[in-house]
């Protein structure tokens, strides 16, 4: 899985025959969250997220249907990560280069253009950062300002 991101709810997808992207929604599980400290928004997407699994369920107008409105439906996913399988639904994790099949567009017509994960900086990131590098990158910012006093009690120099 070298350097590939897992896909989560909110990932942006695009059909090669559509005109606009849509965001993926995870409907097959409600327990596994990734890259989010609160665990409330970024559900892990799996290969069994099929059917109408998008926020608007459309990629705009469809070139395969004479530019009539698209009705996005996923019939299967390819290129998912075989080594991660959720116990409760046997879903295998989608990767950022996974592709979906639509009954109108055909195999692998839907691609993921953004995996949906976002980095959340925390006080721990500031504590772990090289102070000299921070000073070079952010010369007017005092990193200690972003660490709570209670966190500083546990910091070892």
Image (cartoon, rainbow, N blue to C red):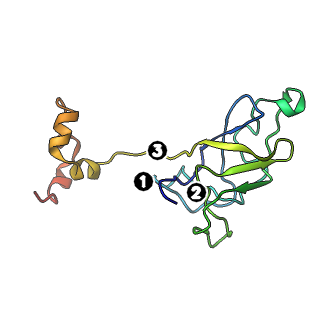
The image shows residue 3, relative to residue 66, as above or below, that is below
Task: Name the residue at the front extreme.
Answer: 2
Q: Which label number is shown at residue 107?
A: none
Judging by the rendered image, the residue that carries numbered circle 1 is 37
Query: Viewed as shown, does residue 63 lie left or right of 54?
Result: right
> In which quadrant of the rendered image does the C terminus lie?
bottom left
Instruction: Report how many numbered discs are placed on residues in the image.
Output: 3
Q: Secondary structure at mark 2?
A: loop
Label 1 Cα crowd, 10 Å radius (few <14 / some 14-19 / many 20+) = few
Q: Position of residue 75 (x, y in %)?
A: 80, 53
In this rendered view, identify the residue nearer to me: 43 or 67: 67
Query: Does the CB distance between marks 1 and 3 fall below 8 Å?
Result: no
Q: Which label number is shown at residue 44?
A: 2
Q: Earlier in the sequence, mark 1 or mark 3?
A: 1
Q: Secondary structure at mark 1?
A: loop
**Residue 53 seen in the current view:** yes
Q: Position of residue 18 (x, y in %)?
A: 76, 32
Query: Does the CB distance between marks 1 and 2 fall below 8 Å?
Result: no
Q: Tell me which residue sits at (86%, 47%) in the image.
A: 103
Task: Identify the image quadrant of residue 54.
Answer: top right
Comparing labels 1 and 3, the label whose residue is closer to the camera: 3
Q: Tell me which residue sits at (19%, 33%) in the image.
A: 141
Judging by the rendered image, the residue that carries numbered circle 3 is 118
Q: Position of residue 19 (x, y in %)?
A: 73, 28
Q: Tell me which residue sits at (46%, 44%) in the image.
A: 118
**Residue 142 seen in the current view:** no
Q: Earlier in the sequence, mark 3 or mark 2?
A: 2
Q: CA distance from mark 3 to mark 2?
A: 13 Å
């Amino acid at each position: 899985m070298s350097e590939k991101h897992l896909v989560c709810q909110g990932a942006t997808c695009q059909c090669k025959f559509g005109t606009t992207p849509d965001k993926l929604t995870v409907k097959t599980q409600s327990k596994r969250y990734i890259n989010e400290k609160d665990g409330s928004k970024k559900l892990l997407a799996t290969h069994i997220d099929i059917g109408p699994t998008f926020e608007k369920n459309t990629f705009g107008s469809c070139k395969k249907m004479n530019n009539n409105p698209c009705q996005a439906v996923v019939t299967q996913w390819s290129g998912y990560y075989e080594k991660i399988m959720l116990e409760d639904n046997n879903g295998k994790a989608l990767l950022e280069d996974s592709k979906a099949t639509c009954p109108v567009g055909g195999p692998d017509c839907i691609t993921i253009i953004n995996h949906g994960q976002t980095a959340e900086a925390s006080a721990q990131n500031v504590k772990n950062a090289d102070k000299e590098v921070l000073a070079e990158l952010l010369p007017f910012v005092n990193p200690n300002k972003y660490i709570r006093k209670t966190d500083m009690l546990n910091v070892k120099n």
